[in-house]
Image: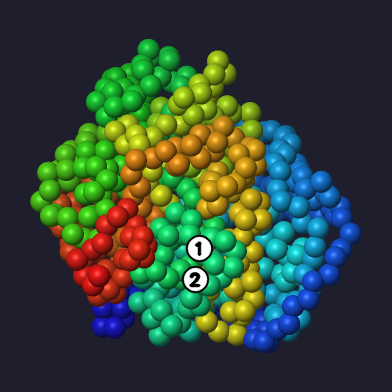
């Protein structure tokens, strides 16, 4: 508890005071509903058409029309003015499971609050999901989006609410250690949250590999809603062609391409300093490539020797490659880095497959192709980060539900979101794949997602992404900040000190929790850490 209080204090002091006050006020304002409810099902006629107009933060405006028809086809028509790259009008159709019934809920709150960081240009999938939930249950979801990719701001806003005893009805969280950080901040540790294991059983999610990966010691405190991948490289093929460079399949080729581009004065890696996380991701992918999956998992649990040579090798490569960032890298966030990639202002972006969703939803004229299906008109290629082929670095978004007056409605929301129907609405637009292995391929609108389904099922190794839940929040934040400093200064001494601290801290926090990923029957990646009694 001493650990948790001091950790939480540090976390709060780091969160912007304005954001915290804002989110606490929002949470208090949201009405508290009756805890006990009865639910009855009625049928409503379809089709229905609903128009949602959303004003994005910053300077762009999006108008979205969502039409749900009896034939279970969801059509999303967007007219979008993007200040960053181009103006475009498109129509996207993806098939979703039919919604022919509406469920009336009595005794549940009419409104619930959901905390997330899916905002701005990555809001389409969550908005479609919330819309479907509201249609079905007639409960309004107040989406409180604290922008900042990977939860760079949202996590601390949620931590603050939990500590203040005013948690939202439900919130977005990654699988793994990140969830334990919330336990540490909560007054009653795991008991402050609804154990959703039985809900997962009800919706057929319990035994799927993604659900197992989302478990902590056999329990699901967060219901998984998607399956993303972190170890990806996005490549502007035109830039490589212009300089006669090959698509890099190995680390050696990647470094070669980057150095040639640098000589020509062309940025190679468009990693984003403003929201930090893709800079840290570059280091973790290099470490995965040189150290392999076992060491990567040992890093996560803090059981790795901090003097392992793979750390030094990855760091040297990182410092070298960070010299190829564009001069404005500190002002890029992950979405503007993708915009710059599309414009050809650099050759590579190391990021997760939420980039697939972003390109599909926002840049429909851009042709994104997986490495084994490049066509004549391909603009951007996606491939496993060189040296990590055959490894799937999972990123799983989950929904957690704090216990409290809104918990029943929160569980309803989490259950719908994680259900097959919910995931089939959400994931096509999100750029991810679902957690249900039997999902039909034709729900995915992009070749990249179909490729990922195959990559996932044929992967030789699975690891869980360090930057997306694998690290405890305090370690994660220091890791992110230090990776920026490392790229800015090249000072490896400070970095090695941080890595040493991070590995020890991971060990300390995991072993204090006594937890591990997966269950005793199915430990994640077959690894049982030493503090677990078999
Ligand atoms: C990750 C999250 C993804 C995507 C990405 C960019 O942390 O798991 O779903 O949202 O951040 O914000």
Label number found at residue 206: 1
Label tally = 2
Q: Residue 490 placed where, x, y %?
A: 19, 42
Q: Is residue 189 above or below residue 47?
A: below
Quadrant for the N terminus, please. Answer: bottom left
- Which residue is denoted by mark 2 in the rendering? 197
**Crowdedness near tag 1: few (<14), some (14–19) or many (≥20) residues, C-alpha within 10 Å:** many
Q: Secondary structure at mark 1?
A: loop
Name the residue: 48% across, 84% down. Answer: 165
**Observer-nearest of 17 and 382:** 382
Picture quarter containing residue 321? top left
Q: Residue at x 55, y 15 (%)?
A: 376
Locate residue 496, reporting x and y percent.
Answer: 15, 52
Residue 15 in sight here? no
- Say if 84 sits above or below 106 in the image: above
Who comes first in sequence, dot 2 or dot 1? 2
Do the residues under discs 2 and 1 have CB atoms within 8 angstroms? yes
Q: Is the CB atom of the residue marked by disc 1 within 8 angstroms of ligand 1's nearest atom?
A: no
Q: Nearer the viewer, residue 198 or 298?
A: 198
Q: CA distance from mark 2 to mark 1?
A: 7 Å
Q: Is residue 516 above or below residue 276?
A: below
Q: Position of residue 476 (x, y in %)?
A: 32, 59
SS under mark 2? helix
The image shows residue 227 at horizontal and vertical percentages of 49, 50
Residue depicted at x 26% and y 78%: 3
**Left or right, 306 with reference to 253:** left
């Amino acid at each position: 508890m001493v650990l948790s209080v001091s950790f939480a204090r540090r976390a709060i002091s780091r969160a912007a005071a304005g954001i915290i006050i804002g989110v606490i006020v929002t949470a208090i304002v949201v009405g508290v509903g009756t805890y006990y409810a009865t639910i009855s099902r009625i049928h409503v006629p379809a089709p229905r058409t609903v128009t949602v107009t959303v004003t994005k933060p910053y300077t762009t405006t999006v108008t979205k029309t969502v039409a749900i028809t009896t034939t279970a086809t969801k059509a999303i028509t967007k007219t979008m003015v993007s200040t960053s790259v181009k103006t475009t009008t498109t129509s996207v159709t993806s098939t979703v499971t039919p919604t022919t019934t509406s469920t009336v809920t009595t005794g549940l709150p009419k409104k619930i609050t959901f905390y997330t960081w899916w905002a701005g240009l990555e809001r389409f999938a969550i908005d479609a999901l919330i819309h479907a939930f509201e249609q079905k249950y007639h409960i309004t979801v107040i989406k409180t989006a604290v922008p900042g990719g990977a939860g760079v701001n949202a996590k601390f806003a949620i931590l603050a609410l939990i500590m203040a005893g005013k948690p939202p009805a439900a919130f977005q969280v990654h699988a793994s250690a990140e969830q334990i950080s919330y336990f540490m901040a909560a007054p009653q540790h795991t008991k402050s949250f609804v154990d959703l294991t039985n809900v997962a059983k009800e919706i057929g999610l319990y035994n799927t590999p993604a659900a197992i990966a989302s478990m902590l010691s056999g329990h699901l405190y967060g219901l998984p809603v998607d399956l993303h991948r972190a170890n990806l490289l996005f490549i502007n093929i035109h830039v490589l062609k212009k300089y006669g460079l090959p698509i890099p399949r190995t680390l050696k080729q990647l470094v070669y391409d980057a150095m040639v581009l640098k000589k020509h004065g062309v940025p190679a890696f468009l990693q984003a300093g403003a929201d930090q996380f893709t800079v840290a991701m570059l280091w973790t992918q290099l470490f995965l490539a040189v150290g392999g999956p076992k060491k990567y998992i040992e890093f996560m649990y803090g059981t790795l020797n901090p003097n392992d040579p793979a750390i030094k090798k990855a760091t040297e490569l990182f410092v070298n490659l960070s010299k190829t960032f564009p001069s404005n890298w500190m002002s890029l966030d992950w979405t503007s880095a993708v915009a710059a990639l599309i414009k050809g202002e650099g050759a590579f972006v190391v990021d997760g497959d939420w980039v697939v969703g972003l390109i599909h939803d926002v840049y429909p004229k851009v042709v994104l192709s997986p490495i084994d299906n490049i066509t004549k008109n391909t603009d951007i290629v996606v491939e496993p980060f060189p040296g990590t082929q055959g490894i799937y670095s999972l990123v799983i978004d989950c929904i957690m539900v704090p216990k409290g007056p809104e918990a029943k409605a929160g569980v309803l929301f989490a259950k719908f979101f994680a259900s097959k129907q919910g995931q089939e609405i959400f994931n096509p637009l999100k750029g991810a794949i679902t957690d249900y292995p039997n999902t039909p391929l034709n729900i995915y609108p992009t070749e990249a997602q179909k490729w990922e389904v195959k990559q996932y099922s044929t992967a030789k190794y699975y690891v869980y992404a360090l930057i997306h839940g694998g690290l405890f929040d305090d370690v994660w934040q220091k890791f992110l900040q230090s990776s920026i400093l490392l790229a800015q200064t090249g000072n490896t001494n400070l970095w090695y000190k941080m890595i040493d601290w991070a590995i020890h801290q991971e060990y300390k926090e995991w072993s204090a929790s006594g937890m591990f990923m997966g269950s005793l029957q199915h430990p994640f990646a077959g690894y049982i850490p030493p503090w677990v009694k078999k």
